[in-house]
Amino acid sequence: MAAALRLARQHLGQTSTNPSVACLIVKDGVIVGRAVTARSGRPHAETQALVEAGERARGATAYVTLEPCSHHGKTPPCADALVASGVARVVISILDPDERVAGRGVVRLRDAGITVDVGVLPEEGHRALEAYLMRQVERRPHVTLKLAISADGMIGRKGAGQVRITGPIARAQVQVLRAQTDAILVGIGTATADDPELTVRLPGLEDRSPVRIVLDRRLDLSPGSKLVRSARAVPLIVVSAEPAPQSELEDGDHALRRAALEAEGVEILETGTVTDLLSALGSRGISSLLVEGGAVAARAFLDAGLVDRIQIYTGPQSIGENGIASPFDRRSVPSGFTLVNSARYGDDLFEEYEREN
């Protein structure tokens, strides 16, 4: 099961709207079939692993990180495929809270005479599938807030655009995080000051860029920005406020800015609150969201109580004069979060905090 959970992580952020699930088929101590949910979300892991195993699946044990589906969707149920294959035993890490499954997969397998064991490495299973579980149970994405903070508690310098706070190892770690996430979000202040692209730039992972999202109440994002210019290659959602009173629309300028962005392939999403935004993202199958900048966006999610994980990268240098203060640093992490991991990436300190249940 530990091997299956490691395999499941390979396609994190790439299988929407389905979870990234792994399946290993083992016979006589040998893995005869292995697969992870395809990057399009289909085919599922179980059917792929069974195809690889072929006749060797008969009498074998299947290790699956999430309860096999039992309902007919765009593909037949995986539980039925396991029954047809002749496997003797199925080992499951965690049950699927999807109301169409929710234990029915286990019942289907047991009714067919297959031995089923549930709850193997359940904590690890919940962690591997935390984003999917959040969307199923809470109807919203799992939110990670990432901050790169200087030694003096700053996240940037006023008027300086992008300021490198961390070294190449830490920056590469952030690229991997992006590649494992469904969507990445910044505020309009960061989008304007830094002109980022928010794509994955590590060699070999360039095609794993997440959906980009910009909080931009007035639709001030420039059509000439890197984000907009790449909107047809990598999806870009600009989140504006719900329709404002005419006095705030500057006599039609708002409509003109909207039209200019939409002409470049940008999707405009109107929401009232951060909570509404997360509900809208969850409804379209986005299970994980990385909030990457800046201070205003970070504070909005924190104040709404909608941050599930905090990752802090602390660099060794100070920014000093004209620095943009972080909403907090490693010495003042908001209450309700517990340190679960720390590491050194060159000269940078990485710390990870999770929200207490």
Image: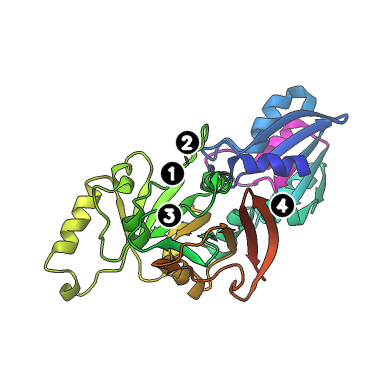
Tell me which numbered mark, 3 or 1, is placed earlier along the sequence. Answer: 3
Q: Residues within 10 Å of mark 3 (few under 14, many from 20)?
A: few
When the figure is inspected, residue 177 is found, relative to residue 154, above or below; the finding is above
Q: Quadrant of the C terminus?
A: bottom right
Residue 197 % position (x, y): 38, 46
Nearer-the-camera pick, 170 or 160: 160
Looking at the image, tell me whether mark 2 or mark 4 is earlier in sequence order.
4
The first of marks 1 and 4 along the sequence is: 4
Which residue carries the number 4 mark?
125
Amino acid type of the residue that numbered disc 1 sits on in the rendered structure: Thr
State how far apart marks 1 and 2 are (Cα): 7 Å
Q: Residue 81: within the magenta?
A: yes
Between discs 1 and 2, the one toward the N terminus: 1
Q: Give the farthest residue toward the left.
A: 251
Q: Residues within 10 Å of mark 2 (few under 14, many from 20)?
A: few
Between the residue at mark 3 and the residue at mark 1, the CA separation in whole angstroms equals: 18 Å
The residue that appears at 23% across and 49% down in the rendered structure is: 223
Region of the chain picked out in magenta, as a range: 64-88
Check disc 1 and report the residue beneath it: 199
Q: Residue at x 63, y 48 (%)?
A: 346
Mark 2 or mark 3: whose residue is earlier in sequence? 3
Residue 252 lies, in percent from the top left, at 13, 64
